[in-house]
Image (cartoon, rainbow, N blue to C red):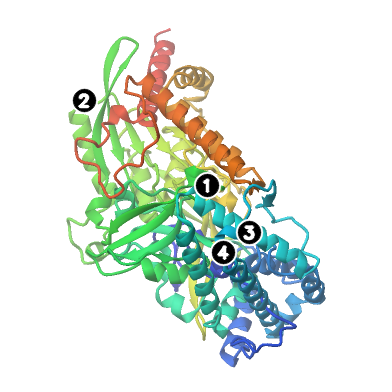
Amino acid sequence: MRYQLPPRRLSMQRFLPSTALALLLGFSALPLAASTAAVNSWDGLQPDREQVIASLNVVELLKRHHYSKPPLNDERSVIIYESYLKLLDPARSYFTATDIAEFDQWRNKFDDLLKGGDLDPGFVIYKRHLDRLKQRLDFALAQLDKGIDSFDFSVDESLQVNREKTPWAKNSAELDELWRKRVKDEVLRLKIAGKEPKAIQELLTKRYKNQLSRLEQTRSEDIFQAYINAFAQSYDPHTNYLSPDNAENFDINMSLSLEGIGAVLQSDNDTVKVVRLVPAGPAEKSKQIAPADKIVGVAQGNGEMVDVIGWRLDEVVKLIRGPKGSVVRLEVVPASNGPNDQTSKIIAITREAVKLEEQAAKKSILKLSHDGREYKLGVIEIPAFYLDFKAFRAGDPDYKSTTRDVKRLLAELQKDKVDGVVIDLRNNGGGSLQEATELTGLFINQGPTVLVRNSDGRVDVLADENPGSYYTGPLALLVNRLSASASEIFAGAMQDYHRALILGGQTFGKGTVQTIQPLNHGELKLTLAKFYRVSGQSTQHQGVLPDIAYPAVVDTKEIGESALPEAMPWDSIRPAIKPEVDPFKPFLIELKARHDARVAKDPDFVFTRDRLELVQQLTHETTVSLNEAKRRAQHADIETQQLTMENTRRKAKGEEPLKELKKEDEDALPTEDEKLKPEDDAYLSETGQILLDYLGLNAAVATH
């Protein structure tokens, strides 16, 4: 049975992890006022009739059509309340315990309030949040007015940076002490990053004043969007309300792939974090920005760098977007710095649309020595699951598609007499569901490829209906944490049919389907179905687990479905195929032992593992010293560790060691000569070695 999509605009055509859609999280540093004498521009903001009607529509749509259909009751009210507070004040640095005691009257009532169309409590909390934020920004500016020299960095004191579970401040005096340390920390970070006192004073003063001016621009729609999203996202992280403005720019906000930089972004407290790079997009091709990096500044061409800390995500997106061919400069804090090192770099990216041909599947030959013999393995890199829908619908016989391209590349590789094939799905964020199904059909005889369970419990089956498989030779798939959605469907099918060895990292884990439902005011993106593998296992939350795991290049606690709040759980349903004998299972223990022995000495594997361990170690630190000597010593120690790791790798590869870690030319693109050969890609080469190990072990058994 073919899966019929609902008659609404779907957000699954590219299967992008919907963390990119958290446009509402931009005010992650905003509080409000109950007892200030001054009249603020937001004091009179109230919900209007259109918003009330939209909220009632959202309540009804979630009740009738959300996949899980959880009841809107007191238990959900608590989730909504706590999510709203976390959205507004994630570091518990604005509200006081007195504010929270006042808000607690609604803790178990948001269900009834929403059912009745009463939005007032949501507005009260948000406006109090704005008041508190204004008080904190005024305090910060007052601290700066005393001059940078007024901060004593010889005092041995520290700042708690992880405050998610910290008790709410008892009073304003306690917040004053927290913010005195926060401002001091901001100054110290910039000082260690090499900025002069005058520049630090100007930068921070401008930052806080800009945030104050942005508060004055708060609209009723900003409050409504934040509140309704706290409600919608209590169901799952991919269910979102889109305001009329954001609904208009939905696709661009999601991927920035149209005349942008090709990066999926999300709000992360006061900054914007990179979630994923669009394959063949300008950002990915620059090689200067990576997932989990933070964007703290944006400039147009050679213009002034605009500090965007504290900005909403949608506003940062507007700055990054621009005419095709124009240059945008980004100030980026690499994730590899660790959470306490704000040293940034400036990168320049030329905006352009991602061309379909640049995302096309590509082939190469991987030449390896194994057990005293030379082998050739075909490598097919698939950056995305693409289909030229326009040409397909027009009946163009030469329309572009992943399956057609891979089929052609397989034929070419077989002419080259390769000993096996590796399909590289690293960083493939998904794409066409149809292509994931048809590509599976090239490697299996016939049968189901993916199951889609709807909110009413009905399971639709997508299947390869063409008998016979196109390629029957040895096959391995290379995946990582950024392999998502359609990639997971294809990899899951290859694993369930025991058609390929799955190697690399645990995949992203997005196994849900969304639809866009127009409202009287804005739109609701709604999760209405869930993907399941033919084995009956969901791809949701857990993703696809590799047969043999490699060290992750990103922190899986920071990136992936399981890192998102209220992510729907993994589960299973009745399988669509009967279990068959797994040809890989008898050899997995030996394959893993050989793999472990190789990578224990492989310089690139050792470097990746050690670097990730260092980043995780730094992430787990909950406090930072405000003593300059101690802070500089800590930074020096981290740089020494990073330099040692880099030089250990270089020495093992016969390269000259570095005397210090240097910034590379941040505007330079790799030349053709600098681009990696397949053999130079450690993960790709190791995948080939494992596949050859399997062929040797299997042949040995067959001859006995």
Counting residues from the start of the chain, the first of labels 3 and 1 encountered is 3
Q: Quadrant of the C terminus?
A: top left
Q: Is residue 569 left or right of residue 438?
A: right
- Local packing at callout 2 (Cα closer than 10 Å; few below 14, some 14-19, many 20+) is few
Q: Nearer the viewer, residue 269 or 549?
A: 269
Residue pictured at 77% horizontal, 74% vertical: 99
Q: CA distance from mark 2 to mark 1?
A: 50 Å
Q: Which is nearer the N-term, disc 2 or disc 4? A: 4
Disc 3, disc 1: CB below 8 Å? no
**Which of 120 and 169 lies nearest the eye of the viewer?**
169
How far from the left and from the top, in percent, is residue 56?
Answer: 63, 83
Look at discs 2 and 4 and give the one toward the viewer.
4
Q: Are marks 2 and 3 in contact (CB under 8 Å)?
A: no
**Circle 1 sits on which residue?**
341
Q: Disc 3 marks which residue?
A: 182
In the rendered image, is residue 498 in sight?
Answer: no
Circle 2 is placed at which residue position?
417
Considering the numbered disc 4 on the image, is that residue within a helix, a strand or a loop?
Answer: loop
For the question of whether residue 349 can be seen, the reply is yes
Q: CA distance from mark 3 to mark 1?
A: 14 Å
Tell me where residue 490 appears, x and y as whole percent. 42, 45
Q: Nearer the viewer, mark 2 or mark 1?
A: 1
Say which amino acid is labelled 3: Arg
